[in-house]
Image (spheres, rainbow, N blue to C red):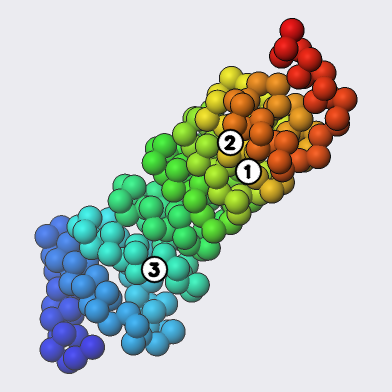
Amino acid sequence: MSSVESIYLFKLAKDKSPRGRKAFAEKLSELFLDKYPALSSREQTLMFDILCLLVHDIEMPLRKAISEQLAEEPSLPRNLAKLLANDAIEIAFPILSLSRALLDEDLIEIIRGRSVEHQLAITVRPSVSEDVSDALVETGNGTVITSMLKNENAEISSKTIAYLVDESQRVTAYQEPILRRKDLDSVLAERMFTWVSTALRQYILDTYELDPDFIDDVMKGAVQ
């Protein structure tokens, strides 16, 4: 940072009015985005602390740019990640979908307290734990649950998988993503065989080892 920039920021920081605070936050954010790759670890930490205090004074386009810049930053502090993740979805999405700074408890709190869009962002994370998956299922939102099922990196407990298999008799959108999951066993696939489409039945036959007697019984019933 140049001496001119330092003097300018110092003058802005002395202005305690709402307008001065906002101007300081905006200028600091612009400098942060411009200088971030070259900042030392100590400078990054200092900037993170300042952003935590001023993030709500920054205009949405700049907050969005900051969120995108920091989404995959391993040193992003949890408190700043939480502030950005609870913002409007335009700002929250990069953090919710990518940042490892958020803990499971943070994600579960957001699932229970924020919008469907926030929930959907969590479903596409590089990894989703069983506890977070359970919280997503508890929303009861078919779109959210389907998106989570399509994420092969989402860990789903055997109890929850069994529940969703039963639900798939009612919610057809669950059927294909469930059947394509690597953690689905043949017992549950066999259970689904009786209510899925012809195409998915063929997929089950091609992918899973089913009891031949069970298949014969199903086919006889279909003929009758």
Q: Mark 3 points at which residue?
A: 70
3 or 1: tag closer to the N-terminus:
3
Question: Which part of the image, by quadrant, shows the C terminus?
Answer: top right
Q: Name the residue under label 1.
A: 180
- Disc 3 + disc 2, Cβ < 8 Å: no
Residue 84 position, x and y percent, is 37, 56
Q: The disc labelled 1 sits on which kind of residue?
A: Arg
* Local SS, label 3: helix
Quarter of the view holding residue 42: bottom left
**How far apart, in angstroms, are the residues tagged by discs 2 and 1?**
6 Å
Q: In this view, does 41 lie above or below 102?
A: below
Q: Is residue 173 visible?
A: yes
Say which residue appears at 34% left-offset and 47% top-offset: 89
Q: Name the residue under label 2.
A: 176
Left or right placement of residue 16 versus residue 223 in this view? left
Say which residue appears at 39% left-offset and 49% top-offset: 86
Residue 137 position, x and y percent, is 58, 34
Residue 27 position, x and y percent, is 18, 72
- Disc 2 + disc 1, Cβ < 8 Å: yes
Q: The disc labelled 3 sits on which kind of residue?
A: Leu
3 or 2: tag closer to the N-terminus:
3
Q: Nearer the viewer, mark 3 or mark 1?
A: 1
**How far apart, in angstroms, are the residues tagged by discs 3 and 1?**
33 Å
Task: Answer few, some or many: residues within 10 Å of disc 2's Cα (few below 14, many 20 plus, some between 14 and 19).
Answer: some
Q: Can residue 158 be seen in this view?
A: no
**How far apart, in angstroms, are the residues tagged by discs 3 and 2?**
35 Å
Say which residue appears at 71% left-offset and 14% top-offset: 222
Foreground: 58 or 9? 58
